[in-house]
Image (cartoon, rainbow, N blue to C red):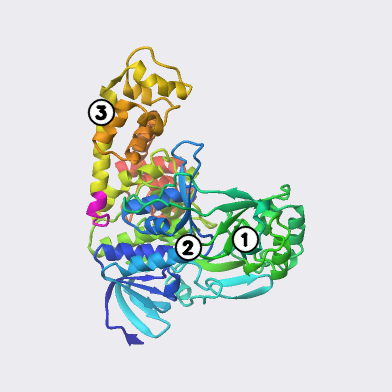
Amino acid sequence: MIKYPEKYDVIVVGAGHAGSEAAAAAANLGKKTLLITMDLTKIAQMSCNPAMGGIAKGQIVREIDALGGYSGIVADLSAVQFRMLNRSKGPAMWSPRTQNDRALFTKIWREQLEKIPGLDLMVDMVTYLTIENEQVKGVKTQLGLEIEARAVILTAGTFMNGRIYIGDTKFGGGRIGEPKSYGLTETLNDLGFESGRMKTGTPPRVDMRSLDFSKMEEQKGDERPGKFSFLPEIKPLEKQLSCWITYTNPVVHDTLRLGFEASPLFSGEIEGTGPRYCPSIEDKIVRFADKDRHQLFVEPEGWHTYEMYVNGFSTSLPIDVQIESLRRVPGFEKAKIIRFGYAIEYDWFPPTQLYHTLETKLIRNLYFAGQINGTTGYEEAAAQGIMAGINAALRLDEKEPFVLQRDQAYIGVLIDDLVIKGTDEPYRMFTSRAEYRTLLRQDNADLRLTPLSYAIGLASEKRMRLVEKKIRDLERLQTFVSATSIKPEDVNPVLTAKNTPEIRQGFKLRKILSRPQLDKEDYMAIDVFRDFVAQHHMDDDTVKQLEIQLKYEKYIEKEKQNAAKWHKLEDIKIPENFDYDKVPSLSFEGREKLKKIRPRTLGQAGRISGVSPSDIQILWVYMGR
């Protein structure tokens, strides 16, 4: 082994979405950081679909941006289409999504990382961790380097003992055409960590010139596209590419079934658990045998490529079956496949072995982030990455950890679910997982999180000033609409246009604007309101915030009250080395789960599967004593 001359505060292993955010956060908090990856041309590679955001995931990207991360910025700068999903529902469900240029996304991420002072990049493979007295001291690499570090963050994605399957063909790899990593799982198992196998997959990519789009439905982006980043210098798209929708049919399904005997999914070759909410096409036609068709989204891979991603057709079936079945899809009769679909099986480590900071319980200053923790999705990985990077830096400075609560962020829900509840299948975020989703909207992520991030030194002064202005403007608007009366002749034309009753006498503007039929554009059609907004140089986002707060005031207040009740349990701390065996009244299962997970608060204890309400009552009484 060769001692590397440089010593680092933080080493990040793997440069996917988790690793990139982790390295950026640690370096931006002043830590000398090294990001080690096997291929610098694949930084934050979009291994699956070329898109960011979506249901609940879009909220996470906005939260990462509000914290001072890069995923939202890079997504905006590489976007080819923007859509706000769930517009027909309430604002708690609105979820931004971009379709992205895959190559440009990676290029911009690398450019962003290379601009960060104190962040070094290295091409190598980490095969071993250096541990002394149950604390990480650095890493050893395939090239024979021994590099010292005060903290290490593992974000190896699907590369740890990765194995790729296409029909009865199988070979090692972390992605198609890229080698697997080895050594880390064995090192961690020797240290006492529990590990398992999971699997994911990806669909074929096709040449768009071979497709007949006249047989598909066109799906355009929003007429007035938004963006992820709260930074004003990041501009929305001026032109966009379309996606397309088509469907499978019974003939496609029958053709797919011809390959089932050779499918590693059904032969037992693949042992790992796959994602329930993003199943392969062969999974779909077995699990949903009553369905005679499944929707497919045909998505562009970028501005300057003919490659298209067939979203919904993930498969590991033999190549000949992939060709024949795909060519029976409307519009795909002459389809030419550029890259075939495949499944990949990889090592993961149950996240109940972590604290909420994502530091491991067994080894100090060692952090796990991303798919190693059993999650699926770029956004979930990036969220864990930024939190691991933040907490590694804070721990080295002997500062308080940075942990987001369930009523503060989707990121808080994600990490709390992983650490407290664990998972036995690839975890994906949904709005339904968040109890306080009316509070955790995509539009207010900056108001929720930028002040917290600024306080620890990550969010910039510029971001904080923007949030402060937004808060001042909102307060000023609230005061204005509460104090200002409006005459019938000044507002009735707007009310009539929206089929809502006219007024016959003066009313406070606040009461009028609270009507569910009116939106931001209607507010701006009222002269007195529009003039006030212009006079104080307020932007559209501030007016939209006012609209949401006025319309959903009662719902927001109710969720705040529910969160306050929840915090009563969350505020009761459990000593780190608490002896549960001294509480004889606990149920056997509850005691065993509590000893394994070691929750930090009574609230966390209550979310552990197997810990009953009576166990919590007993602990509550015991803590009081």
Is residue 513 shown left or right of residue 279? left
Residue 181 at x, y percent in the picture: 48, 76
Q: Nearer the viewer, mark 3 or mark 1?
A: 3
Classify mark 1: helix, strand or loop.
loop
Check residue 479 in the rendering and tell me which mark sits there, or answer none. 3
Residue 565 at x, y percent in the picture: 36, 36
Amino acid carrying label 3: it is Thr
Of callouts 3 and 1, which one flags the residue occurring earlier in the amino acid sequence? 1
Classify mark 3: helix, strand or loop.
helix
Of callouts 2 and 1, which one flags the residue occurring earlier in the amino acid sequence? 1
- Which residue is identified by label 1? 314
- Which residue is identified by label 2? 371
Task: Note whether 4 is above or below 330 in the view shown.
Answer: below
Q: Nearer the viewer, mark 3 or mark 2?
A: 3
Quadrant where the N terminus sits is bottom left
Marks 3/2: CA–CA distance:
47 Å
The span picked out in magenta is: 457-464
Task: Note whether 109 is above or below 417 in the view shown.
Answer: below
Q: Is residue 436 visible?
A: yes
Residue 40 at x, y percent in the picture: 42, 74
Marks 3/1: CA–CA distance:
53 Å
Of callouts 3 and 2, which one flags the residue occurring earlier in the amino acid sequence? 2
Identify the residue at horizontal 61%, vertical 62% (top origin): 208
Identify the residue at horizontal 73%, vertical 47% (top origin): 290
Q: Nearer the viewer, mark 2 or mark 1?
A: 1
Count neighbours of disc 2 (C-alpha within 10 A) and say few if under 14, some if 14 to 19, many if 20 or more.
many
Amino acid carrying label 1: it is Ser
The quadrant where residue 260 appears: bottom right
Depth order, front residue of 323/605:
323
